[in-house]
Image (cartoon, grey):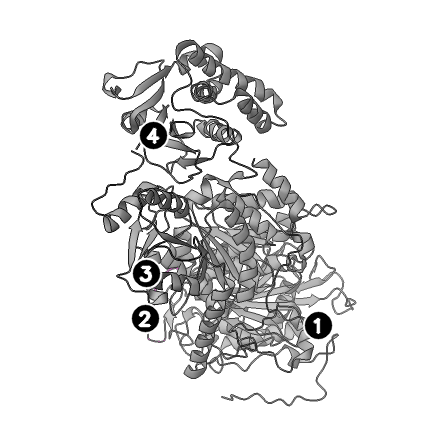
Amino acid sequence: MTYIRSQFRHPGLPVNELGYTTKEYEGAISTLCAGCGHDSISGCIIQACFEMSVAPHRIAKLSGIGCSSKTPTYFLGNSHGFNSVHGRMPSVATGANMANRDLIYMGVSGDGDTASIGMGQFVHVIRRNLNMVYIVMNNGCYGLTKGQDSATADEGSKSKKGSVNPFQPIDLAGMALELGATFVAQSFSGDKEQLVPLIKAAIDHPGFAFINVISPCVTFNNNPGSTKAYDYVREHIEASATIDFVPAKTEITTKYAHGTGTDIEMHDGSHIHLEKLAAGLNPYDRLAAMNALQNARNNDEILTGLLYIEPESTDLHHTIQSSDRALNSLGQEELCPGAEALAGVNEKFR
Amino acid sequence: MRESKVNNFVVRFANVNGTGSASANYLFAKAVFRMGVPVTPKNIFPSNIQGLPTWYEVRVSEKGYLGRREGVDIMVCMNPQSMPDDVKSVKSGGYFLYDSTKRLHPELIRDDVNYIGVPLMEICNREYTDPRQRQLFKNVMYIGALSTLLGIEFEVLQQLLDDQFQGKEKLVAPNVKALKLGAQYILDNYTYPLDIHLKRRNLIGDKIMIDGNAACGLGAVYGGATVVAWYPITPSTSVVEAFEKYAKKMRVDKETGKNNFAIVQAEDELAAIGMVIGANWNGARSFTATSGPGLSLMNEFLGLAYFAEIPTVLIDVQRTGPSTGMPTRTQQSDITLAAYASHGDTKHVLLFPATPKECFDMTAGAFDLAELLQTPIIMMSDLDLGMNDHLSQPFEWDNKRKYNRGKVLNAAQLEEIPHFGRYLDVDGDGIPYRTIPGTHPTKGSFFTRGTSRDEYAAYTEDGTVYAHNMERLLKKWDTAKTKVPAPHLYQKENKSPYGLLFFGTSTYSAEEAIDIMAQESIALDAIRLKAFPFNKTVEDFINSHEKVFVIEQNRDAQMRSLLINELDASPQKLISVLNYDGLPITADTITTQICKNLAPAKTLIYHQ
């Protein structure tokens, strides 16, 4: 495995609207295991941000602790990053978002970081509908401590050492739906075609956007009998639809025959286009999404794609009526009431 | 020793929690204040919403002693549940005011106490029909009775009611009526005023009467806090409530009607401090308020903020620990936890306010300090300071004062420097430069982490680099000693081989104890700490005295440990004066413990 990234880039690399190539969106070289699903997800984040022409410094990337939470070092090197403490990324993201509503908040977490130690914060950040992208790189095990089962490991799934997990799994996408998340998607690290548009749509979504990505651990959980192994996931994956994200500025071409598929208009005029939507699914219908997810589980299938969206979602700033301007941009003259007002306060206490 | 009985006494009200007695009792304390006489009320309340006994103790002191004092001169007992103990607590020769609608049990009669019976329930039942009014006006009525007994000017009470019910004027008349009913009963049945009574003075000046938590909340508004994250916990809750109240008055954009602040009630204290760290990282001034149990939970994040060098402001309103302890009683027992919060080598800057004015000043100043030092600043208030009203110097703000945002690089500055190093000690003071997310498209971004990293914020497991960074943090700690509020020395030159060292709410009783001991020809020098780390003045004070009495309100002498640990002070020299029963320390406790050491032959119970 290489440990030095070549500085050479093909001179003909495509540039985006900002004049950047993908180089401006890359991070440090990954220290994860070769073949790790997480690296593919990092690649998808880079591609999505490049294609959307997001200015890298307008993104803040945040994570907790674990293999997944290391990844923000490996993408978007021109963005500020915050590798916080285990299971607490949602609170740090909440504070950051309250301070500056104008940035894009990209949260990355793992199944241990979210479904175990961070369950409380995960649940509450959904409740508040914080405007952020929340990606779980879900491999069903604790990689950094060498392969213990996590809370998302399926009952009966076999670990590399041969032990069988006796506990019910926590279904994060199902939970997000139940808790009222305004954007819920599920994907697979090996399905770039699906994941890149999902990330774009999640970035564009004006509230909490959750993507649960099955991301096999090649070292500790890629063995026969594991339900998070590459082979198993490929065999059991069931896409709810194909997906395409069309930004607002793009003219919608005749790529889609009129009347086919489902078109979701986003708050800013962007579109999500779904083709071959599975029977009974409707991206605006939370109950249908919950049913579909349960049915898939009963059939040992992994349902992927955009499961639910509320395109007109608002966010926490709207709920608490905080300023339209970034709070961190307010100056002393707007924040400090001054000596005269203080004299009035004193008078009330005499 | 006989003391004057004018403007020098303690009244204790014994009530049932949830019966609306608080506002009537406050009316009494405020009336004393308006008569120009120093007063200090303390609410001794249960961890309960309704039904348990609660007391309100008002010390009136012409000499301006504002600490708690043992011994009750006048007991206003409205709670049958606590009556046997309440009778016992009255000083010999004192007074016991009670509702005489029912006769007192003979066992409650003491020969050395004067009983004043007022048939409050009977009068209420006669005058009011609504059950809630009967309960509420009973409270106002005993204040009326007291006003005659103690010589409180009726116009003062009338004015206070006018102030209290501004906008709800129709409530004034029934309250005045209740006051008059109580006053009239005394006029008709007792001699007045008592030997213990009030006389108008002019000893208040421009002082205000306010609780420390309101002062902290207001200080945070003035200090420029925009993001507040918190989890409700007694006794800190009213800090954020005060922030919200003042922010809604002073921080709403007139044009848009939107808030120039964001308050998030978090799911727990972990999340609260996480949000504060996230907001500060992102360039907003942000704080949380909590108490001991919350501080325990916040340890993990405090370690991160220390190591990753993120400004953080935390207001700890201490209560009686350990564990859930006595949630509605006071203590100074989070000191060592706060000073060294989190695993690994950590030290945190602490501030010790003693008055509401200092709560305001230090909270506002904490944001400057946090950004200057890029580290957590923990305000060590306590329940006594936070939740009780105190006489205080008025709040002041200099309109010329500018927020000091510390070393933050903007886009233009980033253009100037060849290579930004987040943890590079450019100025030699241990404080590096930081950047706020979103500042510049290609310069100044870095990765914040709790793992070790080099001066350019890149992950490293190189032990030398790690150690170098830890040493820089120590250098920053030394810089902090020159930036935190300096201690207050009570004398220009030492007058005594013995010194007193105290901080926070022990100040009131410590100052009184100094006077008491001076009268007994025991001279003491004194120093009041305002912050940790300790500066040279503290070190010199200890070194230049044979013995230093360290007054604190916890069992384990936590501040003494800190002095020994940080200053290498000789343990033999530092003698503890402790109080940890959950009630504010008294001057008697202090003098007794000091005399036991200095003059074992003397007994110095001044007030009994």
Q: Main secondary structure of the magenta part?
A: loop
- The front one of B600 and A269 is B600
Query: Alpha-carbon distance for marks 2 and 1?
Result: 46 Å
Identify the chain of the residue marked 3, using the numbered disc in the image.
B
The answer to which image quadrant residue B369 occupies is: bottom right
Crowd band around label 2 with a 10 angstrom C-alpha radius: few (<14), some (14–19), many (20+): few
Q: Which residue is mark 1?
A: A53
Between discs 2 and 1, the one toward the N terminus: 1
The location of residue A103, given as percent across then percent down, is: 65, 64
Residue B604 is situated, as x and y percent measured from the top left of the image, at: 27, 41
Mark linked to residue A163: 2
- In the picture of the structure, the residue carrying the numbered disc 3 is B561
Which stretch appears magenta? A160-168
Instruction: Locate the N terminus of chain B by quadrant.
Output: top left
Q: Which mark is residue B72?
A: 4
Say what amino acid the circle numbered 4 marks.
Val
Depth-wise, is mark 4 or mark 1 nearer the camera?
Answer: 4
* 10 Å crowding of disc 3: few (<14), some (14-19), many (20+): some
